[in-house]
Image: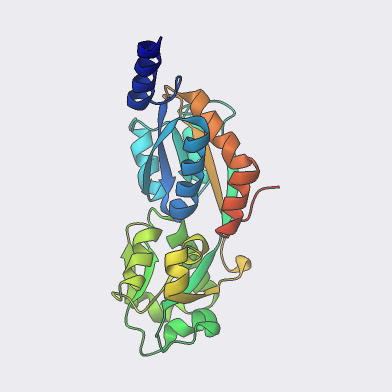
């Protein structure tokens, strides 16, 4: 009997809980901190494992069209998963608008810039480099350009823009000192590391098209039930609290 118990314990240690599965998740990089907390708690409670890849929504969209092996896709622009749905590449009925994102002007501590001036601060002569995500494939980059156009500063500052591959890279450019200031996701500005390293000014929602974010389960998923469980956790009290804490507006 003792041998049987030891064998079972060893099997648990090697393979994890009985019925534990793994799913691959592609997520927009504005979710960097929120999704890691959500996944960590989900794994703890279910025993399942989530393999997370972070990047730009547009790049993931192109990869998924070519059959990239992801079970679940979180996009900072709901338009991408909608297109995948239209192309018949997703599990019918799985599309879900999980949040609305916000953008901010962010500068590091010690910066002489007065962030309270908002987007007008980008015109300051001391500003040589402004970090944003690449608007060609990053929704937050498109929102940044729209906000600058709305504030009538884009023409004056467009030659100073430094494009990050995604919004996390844009944030790294400012945090590292490679850029003087930037426009990044509120969810990144609220992360402990960046919150203590700088200050931000929230761009009014009406200054750019809403950053409606959507998720969808891919038809090719071998573990659609586990993907559904992760979405259910996101929609539950714990998941919603984490999303709110990182500045996301939740769907009604």
Height in image: 186 above or below 151?
Answer: above
Q: Viewer-proximal residue, 203 or 189? A: 189
How many marks the image carries: the answer is 0
**Coordinates of residue 252 in the picture (x, y in percent):** 71, 47
Q: Viewer-proximal residue, 198 or 164? A: 198
Q: Viewer-proximal residue, 162 or 3? A: 3
**Coordinates of residue 31 in the picture (x, y in percent):** 47, 52
**Coordinates of residue 18 in the picture (x, y in percent):** 45, 20
Height in image: 187 above or below 150?
Answer: above
Q: Quadrant of the N terminus?
A: top left
* Residue projecting furthest to the front: 2
Residue shown at the point (58%, 37%) measured from the top left: 233
Residue shown at the point (40%, 60%) measured from the top left: 167
Height in image: 141 above or below 96?
Answer: below
Can residue 82 be seen at all in this image of the molecule? no
**Coordinates of residue 191 in the picture (x, y in percent):** 47, 62
Can residue 60 be seen at all in this image of the molecule? yes
Query: Left or right of 172: which side holds 31?
Result: right
Query: Left or right of 175: which side holds 185?
Result: right
Residue shown at the point (32%, 78%) measured from the top left: 129
Residue shown at the point (32%, 82%) measured from the top left: 128
């Amino acid at each position: 009997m003792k041998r049987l118990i030891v064998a079972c314990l060893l099997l648990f240690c090697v393979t994890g809980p009985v019925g534990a599965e793994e799913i691959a998740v592609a997520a927009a990089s504005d979710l960097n901190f929120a999704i890691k907390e959500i996944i960590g708690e989900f794994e703890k409670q279910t025993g399942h494992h989530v393999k997370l890849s972070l990047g730009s929504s547009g790049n993931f969209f192109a990869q998924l069209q070519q059959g990239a092996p992801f079970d679940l896709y979180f996009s900072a622009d709901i338009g991408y998963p909608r297109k995948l749905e239209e192309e018949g590449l997703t599990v019918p009925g799985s599309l879900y608008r999980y949040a609305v994102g916000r953008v901010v002007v962010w500068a590091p501590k010690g910066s002489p810039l007065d962030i309270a001036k908002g987007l007008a601060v980008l015109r300051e002569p001391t500003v040589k480099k402004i970090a944003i995500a690449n608007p060609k494939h990053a929704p937050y980059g498109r929102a940044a350009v729209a906000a600058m156009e709305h504030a009538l500063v884009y023409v004056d500052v467009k030659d100073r823009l430094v494009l990050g591959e995604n919004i996390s890279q844009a944030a790294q450019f400012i945090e590292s000192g490679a850029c003087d200031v930037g426009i990044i996701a509120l969810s990144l500005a609220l992360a402990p590391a960046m919150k203590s390293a700088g200050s931000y000014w929230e761009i009014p929602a009406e200054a750019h098209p809403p950053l409606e974010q959507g998720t969808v389960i891919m038809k090719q998923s071998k573990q659609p039930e586990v993907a559904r469980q992760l979405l259910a956790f996101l929609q539950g009290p714990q998941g919603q609290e984490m999303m709110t804490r990182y500045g996301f507006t939740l769907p009604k």
